[in-house]
Image (cartoon, rainbow, N blue to C red):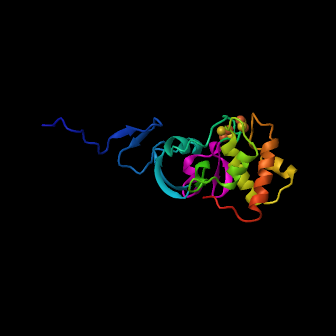
């Protein structure tokens, strides 16, 4: 007599979250099933299960709980979500987390060391380059990436370099001053991220 235990599953078809029928035990993967990715975040290796449709910014905020990376739009315009991916600034709302598998990510939380602000953070503070601060993490990550590529920029080059980041408060003048001050402070040295 058949017991009340778990029904045998061999050969049974189930439905994945996509609604498609998937043969149990077959090798056909449900594209909506979570996958394991390994990333190095602010110097620490993390292996995390993530849904393939999850945006990198949502992964950073809701699974790594690094909420300094902001979401300011749904059109990839504002740059508030900017992080460094293998040292280059990216808008993390434009990538899926699975695309970062095997990469190194630096967020704003990874800059200060031993309770001491990174020089770019200090210069934003000293030059009053923020008001509400919402755009600031993205602006700082963009500045770091930009100065790594162009350590001695002109004012026009700075304007172009930060043009993918919007600030609704400051009018940009003090942000430009902060980038200039960071550039003179860091000189031509490659910048340590964390
Ligand atoms: Fe605005 Fe990413 S959240 S560009
Ligand atoms: Fe408020 Fe830039 S300081 S948006």
At 35% from the left and 49% from the top, the residue drawn is 25
Position of residue 38 measured from the top left corner of the image (x, y, whole percent): 50, 56
At 51% from the left and 43% from the top, the residue drawn is 65
Asked whether residue 49 appears in the rendered view, the answer is yes
Residue 54 lies in the magenta-colored region: no
Position of residue 21 measured from the top left corner of the image (x, y, whole percent): 42, 38
At 63% from the left and 37% from the top, the residue drawn is 71
Q: Nearer the viewer, residue 11 or 154?
A: 154
Q: Nearer the viewer, residue 103 or 109?
A: 109
Taking 66 as reference, is 190 above or below it?
below
Q: Residue furthest bottom?
A: 189
Residue 100 lies in the magenta-colored region: yes
User: In the image, is 99 to the left or to the right of 7?
Assistant: right
Position of residue 133 measured from the top left corner of the image (x, y, whole percent): 68, 38
Q: Residue furthest left?
A: 1
Task: Name the image quarter holding the N terminus.
Answer: top left
Task: Name the image quarter holding the C terminus.
Answer: bottom right
User: In the image, is 11 to the left or to the right of 30?
Assistant: left
Q: Quadrant of residue 60?
A: top right
Q: Nearer the viewer, residue 126 or 104?
A: 126
Boundaries of the magenta span = 81-104
């Amino acid at each position: 007599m058949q017991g009340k235990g778990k029904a045998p599953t061999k050969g049974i078809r189930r439905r994945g979250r996509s609604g498609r029928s998937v043969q149990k035990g077959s090798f056909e993967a449900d594209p909506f099933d979570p996958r394991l990715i390994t990333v190095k975040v602010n110097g620490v290796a993390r292996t995390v299960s993530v849904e393939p449709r999850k945006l990198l910014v949502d992964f950073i905020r809701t699974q790594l709980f690094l909420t300094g990376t902001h979401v300011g739009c749904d059109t990839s315009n504002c740059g508030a979500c900017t992080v460094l991916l293998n040292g280059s600034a990216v808008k993390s709302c434009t990538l899926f987390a699975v695309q970062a598998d095997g990469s190194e990510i630096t967020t704003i939380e990874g800059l200060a060391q031993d309770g001491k602000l990174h020089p770019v953070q200090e210069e934003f503070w000293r030059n009053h380059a923020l008001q509400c601060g919402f755009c600031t993490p993205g602006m700082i990550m963009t500045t770091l990436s930009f100065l790594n590529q162009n350590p001695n920029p002109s004012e026009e080059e700075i304007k172009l370099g930060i043009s993918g980041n919007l600030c609704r408060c400051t009018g940009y003048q003090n942000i430009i001053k902060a980038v200039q001050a960071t550039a003179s402070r860091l000189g031509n040295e490659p910048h340590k991220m964390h």
